[in-house]
Image (cartoon, rainbow, N blue to C red):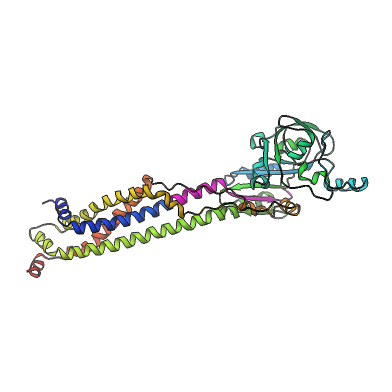
Amino acid sequence: MNFVKRAVYSLVARKGRTAILCGIFTVVCGLLLGGSLLQGATARQEAEAQRRIGVDVTVRGERLTVERAARLGSSPLVERYNPVLSTVTGAPGLRLVESGRPPSAGERRRAEAAAGGAGPGVLGVRETELLLDFATGRARVTAGRAITAADRDRAVVMVEARLAGKNGLGVGDHVTLTAPDGGAREAFEVVGVFEDPLRLPDAWLPPAELAANRLYVPVGALRGLGAGERLGEAVYRISSPERARALHARAERLLGAGDGFRFDVNDKAYREQVGPLRRVGAFARAVVWLIAVAGAVILGLIVTLTIRERRGELGMLLALGEKRWKLIGQHTVEVTAVAVPALAGAAVAAVLLGDRLGDVLPAREPADRPRASPADRADRADGTDRADRADRADPLPRPEVRLTPGDLGRVAGTGLGIALAATVVPGVGILRLHPRSILTDTD
């Protein structure tokens, strides 16, 4: 008789043992599938964290110019970058917001000279979205839109809400700005109004130092007003902290190790979001390996006991001239035939209970921190407060734990490997069986 038919008859005749094997295999496949689903979900959520959060690298240096910042930003390591060019321009006809009690005329002139001028503080940027205040949600666009990389050299401007309100400005209006030396001038179209929550100080400060008078324009347009080439800083968005070392080497070659070179990596938000995910993924991988080994051992013991119980049957078949490899094949078919419905049952359970597996994945809610004080604002100006971006980062959505053909294929392959290991290894004993000794012992 064909050994496959004998395997089918054996499964039908030994319903109790078949049920036990099927139950064990269902549990093993279910646990394997659960671990595989967790691995897939954590991998997807980690990729989403890299896309949404990333790692910000702030570069400063005496030799940092618009051109060098662009060369570093063209590196394949960089996803987005934002050069920051700061200056004080003239703004004829623009009434600036004042704070506190005005000083004497002499003190006012000295303070404004120290601040760089009597006009508003202007920041030339590539994307306002990458600025700390907008990235953390402290500042937000209330009308119009933000400045993006598509604006490049366009004469457009974003105006703070208090300055816009004092001058009756809205989206579509124009503001005239002049070069720091009073030479060149150009009309900038207002494309957005933003709100900065930093309140006016009680003491008087030069208008250029007040957040209420801040303007954002594309860095190329600000260069056209004679603001120069030297940048205060440039912020680079990379996908993971592992890329920071390679970017540091590129920046050092481009800017030199001296001359005030600084390379600050802010990966707090990334690590707080990705770290727990990686721990869950590592735990899921360990569980999968543990279950695979334990399942193979348990099923191997059951098959070993089965072979001992069926020594008489095996001896009779050997005496009739049956090949030993066909006896091993019969046991392999029996275990594999049990594994197929067990895998199907585990797949159905994964579809029904997949959403509950998502509850074990960490979700991080943004912390509710107080608004920044003027002193904090000064700290943020030199980059020391960039790490708190993690406390304002949007929480990642909890991923959908779904069964994919890849997950099912991996578990099926693992289950098949367990079935082979559980039958072939104990089946080595069949190769040493001798029909005469078996039948003599049976008698």
Does 315 lie within the magenta span? no
What's the residue at 78%, 45% (across, down)? Answer: 210
Percent position (x, y) of residue 228? 77, 41
What's the residue at 11%, 60% (across, down)? Answer: 318
* The one of 114 and 136 positioned closer to us in this rendering: 136
* The one of 294 and 365 positioned closer to us in this rendering: 365
Percent position (x, y) of residue 72? 64, 45
Percent position (x, y) of residue 174? 76, 30
Residue 25 lies left or right of residue 319; in this view the side is right
Residue 159 lies left or right of residue 1; in this view the side is right
Percent position (x, y) of residue 63? 73, 48
Does 57 lie within the magenta span? yes
**Magenta residues, as a range?**
39-63
Looking at the rendered structure, the number of numbered marks drawn on it comes to 0
Report the quarter where the C terminus lies: bottom left
* The one of 195 and 222 positioned closer to us in this rendering: 195
